Amino acid sequence: MKGDYSLLHELNGNKENWKIKARVTRLWDVYNLKNRDFMSLDMVLLDEQGNHIHARIKDAFVHQFRESLQEGNIYYIRNFGVIPYQNDYKIVTNEHSIKFYATTIVKPAGSDNLSIPKYKFEFVPFEHLSGRCDKNVHLTDVIGRVSTIFPVYENDKNGKPLKRRIIKIEDKRKRKIQITLWGDLAESITEDACMDRSKSTILIITSTTVKSFKNQLSLSSTYATKVYISLDYQQDYIHWDCEEVVKNKRTIHEIIKFLEQSKSQEAIFYCMAVVKKVNAENGWHYISCTNCHKKAKTIGSTFWCKGCKKGFSSPTRRYRLELRVEDESGSTIFVVFDKEAEKIVRIPATQVYTTEIKDEDDDEDVVPKPIKNLLGKTYMFQIKINPNNIFTTKQNFTAIHVFEDHAYKQLHHEQEEKNQILPLKRAIDVDVEIEREVPKAKRNG
Ligand SMILES: [Zn+2]
């Protein structure tokens, strides 16, 4: 049952007495680029379905809201305007944006509600950045591994000191991109942060502009830019490879046919499909050994792992979701496990169990609400086919990774622009600086 508020995808310009519940995932001040006058307090709001929208409070009303809004917290927001999102430099993908009125009401709803994700990004793969070069339609989110960090450089701009730092990040295929962080952001990441960690540093940088400098693409931070260091997004970074997706994309029909024709061959395919049903006959989760993550046996009120020959009392529950999926060619079942399922449900299985399952008897065949949220949504599934897929009872495939579809749609959209010749344009005045390589030995621990 949904609360007495609307979801972000339901908003339209037809009325003004909307009420929403959303997390302020990003919050920033906007200044006029020419005279540096304060213009507005802007934010990205994110709801429980993982949709986000750009909201703006004009300077005249900001004093009313400044104290009550904090980045990361969740609020009920009432009485605001919903307008077409026609700005240049769009922060997020949405047809609408929100404008606050003097009469808009903001009430805190806590910060720890796990049903609303903390972050959402719209990563653009490096090979598609050229399609955004010198265009003002979207600002660009990127993710990558830090390869080089330059020292902070300070010079005078119109009589005022201006700091900047250049960093280079690389993607899975070691393609590098240069990013300039301006002002205080220059100090949001330090050499120490990159070198002290035992693992390599993954950076997420949001809302950048893409320019071309000396025939090289270069990103630049904006007022809206946020920098995140080593969030739990390594998974996406490591597995998302667009060229591979395009090459190995198949319909459900093609996957089934492949299996029929070459039963002993292993293959990895990508398939975009809509979730039509969550099969619950076999349950939606399993109790796992706290040691080896394998399925454990329930004995009365305790649990036993055959492999580890160990008993334990408080189990970790992990997802095993049987999703009935469909595309234009047919229908089948994709089985999604554990962390991949958690990525799309957005709540750990143990928590869904403790908050949604009141009665032990419900456990087996009832699909809890957070999982029902998947119905009707489109995902890109990475499917592994192996000889064991020869079905005994029921046709199903294991999805080893699941991606949200917006990333793929965006990829597709920008595909056309990919190969166009870029106008050569001098961008920002980057001075030659001494490169400071992150020592490799230290980086790899
Ligand atoms: Zn075990």
Image: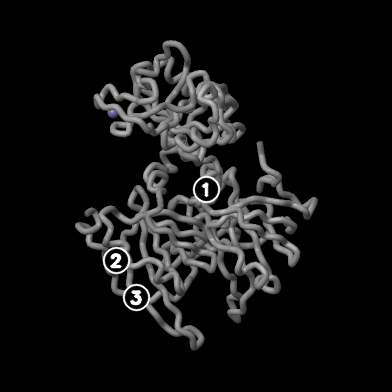
Q: Nearer the viewer, mark 3 or mark 2?
A: 2
Quarter holding the N terminus is top right
Look at the numbered discs 3 and 1 and tell me whether their residues touch, using CB distance below 8 Å. Answer: no
Q: Which residue is mark 3?
A: 432
Residue appearing at x 61%, y 69% in the figure:
66
Element at label 1: loop
Task: Give amino acid for label 2.
Answer: Asp
> How far apart in space, not on screen, are marks 3 and 2 (Cα)?
22 Å
Q: Nearer the viewer, residue 322 or 35?
A: 322
How many neighbours does mark 3 have within 10 angstroms: few (below 14), some (14-19), or many (20 or more)?
Answer: few
Task: Give amino acid for label 3.
Answer: Val
Which residue of the protein is positioned furthest toward the top in this rendering?
A: 392
Q: Tell me if the residue at label 2 has its CB under 8 Å from ligand 1.
A: no
Residue 99 percent across, percent down from the top left: 70, 61
Q: Nearer the viewer, residue 305 or 266?
A: 305
Q: Is residue 187 left or right of residue 70?
A: left
> How far apart in space, not on screen, are marks 1 and 2 (Cα)?
29 Å
Q: Which residue is mark 2?
A: 192
Q: Which residue is mark 1?
A: 117
Q: Going from the N terminus, do you reach mark 1 or mark 2 first?
A: 1
How many neighbours does mark 2 have within 10 angstroms: few (below 14), some (14-19), or many (20 or more)?
Answer: few
Residue 243 in view in this figure = yes
Task: Give amino acid for label 1.
Answer: Pro
Quarter of the rendered structure image containing ligand 1: top left
Residue appearing at x 56%, y 24% in the figure:
366
